[in-house]
Structures are given as structure tokens and as C-alpha cells.
Amino acid sequence: MDHIFRLAHTVKGSSFAAGFMPLGAFAHTFETLLNLLREDKVEATPHVVDILLQSNDTLQKFIAALNDDFDADLDVTHISGLLTECIGANVKEKWDGPAFGFFDDDEPAAPVPPAASAAASPAANKAAATPSPQKPNSTPARSSHVQLSSATQPTVLACDDDEDILEIVVDLIQSINSKFTIVTAADGLQAVEQVKKHKPHLIVTDLRMPNLNGLEFVTEVRKHDEKVPVIFVSGFADRGNIIEFVKLGVMDFLDKPIDQGRLSLSVSNGIKQSQTREGIVRLSTLNFKAYMSTLKLSQIGTEKKTEFDEASQKVKHLLDEIAVLSNYILGL
């Protein structure tokens, strides 16, 4: 029981962190029932035991499918429904514990439910934040440079309805790093469209703009991306604005006329923040892939030498890429 519980616990956490939400959700439900059994909150009837065995088989099939194709999806609607029925129908008394079990080395005081995990790694961001999966027989780059996204360089969105000021902001950002990709918008509505189209690593925006002002624009952005750093540049701000900045998670506010040194520092910090977040998401994905590949390796056995050697090489490649990416993140 403890071995299966730990497996479900590990798969759940790794899946949510890496963005494999269907597998994470199934492992969460499976783990919940296992934990209720461990706490003697559910009676281990023959029916419940049968559901557990089916769930364990489904979990292994899901892992095997993802190991062959990281875009694979498995229909677990039926077995998930059976698990949910077992949880609801067999609880002996009201259970006030956490939504899922934990081990002694976890932090039970602040459990993170799947919804929060999904928000931290939303499916809408997966394509932008998570690169294409490493092919089994490809060799990872062995250099200090790691490409974190499809874009050659970070993308910065600059927004201002004053063309002269917008040009100044673009020139200042370009002087920080000439390889930055800079896209612009003259009002809040254009800015929203640019965010959807380019998924910028950083936003530098005016506060007062037509159609949507800066605060309204960032409010729209936060509906789709809770983490992209935002820098406000404006000559107009009051105490009420500062409160809104905090609520929206604004990174910095710069007065006009713009101080080039402060803007340079703020932009550099914002880009590093985005790259670090993107790197951690990818690192979580690679760790999960390495875990599944190692699990498969342990199931093959050394008697199947060719298959074992290929699986071993895949694990080695993944571990090499994890090491390179870890060093890159630490060097940001």
C-alpha cells in the first residue's frame, strides 16, 4: 500500500509541475483514495480493492504511453468516476484532512491542490514555456547556452499612445540588448492583441492610454498569464494606482521623464525573472521524463541488452540536459 501511495504521490506532483494535467489529476484522485484507506477512513471492501488494482494498472499504462509519446492522452473518465464513487460512498466519517496525503518530509500546513498547481503551470502557457520534448536518440547540447523557447531572443512589449515617448522607450530597450525582439502597441486593446500573438517575456507600458488604460490592460493580461513581469512608465500615478500595482503583481513603476539607468536595470531583472521561470518549468518537465524513463529502464531488465542499452542512453541524455539547464538557470 505504501509503495503504491508513494508512486501516486510522486507522479501527481511531477505531473502537475511539468504540465501533464490529465495524468496529475488522475494520480491525485487515486492518491486520495489510497490515503483514506491508510487513515482507515474507507473500508477496504472487495469492490474498493478491485478499483485500486484497476487504477494502479491505469496509472502504469498512462506512464508507459507518455514514455513513448509525451503528447499522448489516455481516457481515464470511467476509472476516475469509479474512484470518485469509492471516495464518496465508502467514507466512514467526515474527513477534514488535506485534499491529498503527505509524507513526513512534506509541508502539510500548506498543501497545494491541483487547481493551484494548474494555475502555476496553465495549459495556455505550456506551448510558450515548455519546449518540444527531447527525442529519445538525440543528443542534448553540451554548452552553457540553453534555448528556452522558440524565440531566438526574449520578446519585450512596449505600450504607449505617445509616438515620441514610445520611440524613446523602444530605443532604450534596444540599447540594453540589440537582440531583443520588441513589439509595440499604441493603446490597451492593441496591447492585448500583441500579448496573445507574441507571448512577451516582459511588458513595459504607459498608465494612461485610450480604449484600455494601463491598469485595465494588465488586468486582461493577468486573466491569461499571471507571471509575466510588468513595468509601468508614467508621469501620472497616485496612491490608488500603487495599490492596484500590488494587486496585479506589477514588477516596477518608473516616473517620466525616464531614467535610462533604472529602466535598464528593471528590464534586465524582468527578463531574468521570465527566463528563470521558463527554465524551471522546462526543468520540471525533464525531471518527469527522466523519472518515467528510469521507471521503464527498471522494468526492462539487463537480459534484453539492446532495449536496455537504448533506454539507458535515453536516461543519460535526459540527465545531461538536466545538468546543462540547471547550470544555465543558476547562472542567470
Image (spheres, rainbow, N blue to C red):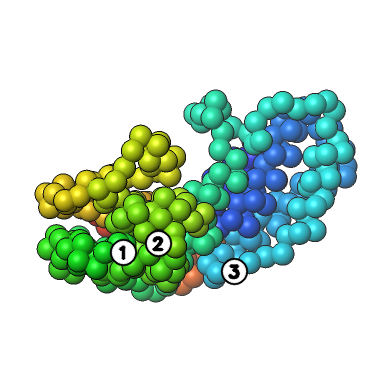
| Image point (74%, 39%), residue name | 33
- Depth order, front residue of 270/172: 172
On-image quarter of the N terminus: top right
Residue 185 falls in image quadrant: bottom left
Q: Is residue 132 left or right of residue 327?
A: right
CA–CA distance in space, label 1 to label 2? 7 Å
**Tag 3 or tag 2, which sits nearer the N-term?**
3
Q: Secondary structure at mark 3?
A: loop
Measuring 80% from the left and 58% from the top, which residue is drawn there? 78
Q: Nearer the viewer, residue 265 or 130?
A: 265
Residue hosting label 2: 210
Name which residue type carries label 2: Pro
Q: Are marks 1 and 2 in contact (CB under 8 Å)?
A: yes
The percent coordinates of residue 97 (x first, y second) are 68, 27
- Given contact means CB atoms under 8 Å apart, are the residues at marks 1 and 3 in contact? no
Dot 3, how many residues are within 10 Å of its Cα: few (below 14), some (14-19), or many (20+)? Answer: few
Closest to the observer, 44 or 178: 178
Mark 2 is surrounded, within 10 Å at the Cα level, by few (under 14), some (14 to 19) or many (20 or more) other residues, namely few
Q: Earlier in the sequence, mark 1 or mark 3?
A: 3
Residue type at tag 3 = Ala
Q: Earlier in the sequence, mark 1 or mark 2?
A: 1
Report how far apart the C-alphas of labels 2 and 3 lie in the structure.
45 Å
User: Tag 1, which secondary structure?
Assistant: loop
Image quadrant where residue 32 sits:
top right
Looking at this view, is 169 or 108 the one in front? 169
Residue 178: image x %, image y %? Answer: 15, 68
Residue at x-position 75% and y-position 27%:
95
- Foreground tag (2 vs 3): 2
Q: Which residue is mark 3?
A: 72
Identify the residue shown where x is 60% and y is 51%: 24
Residue 101 sits above or below residue 205 on the image = above
Q: Which residue is mark 1?
A: 161
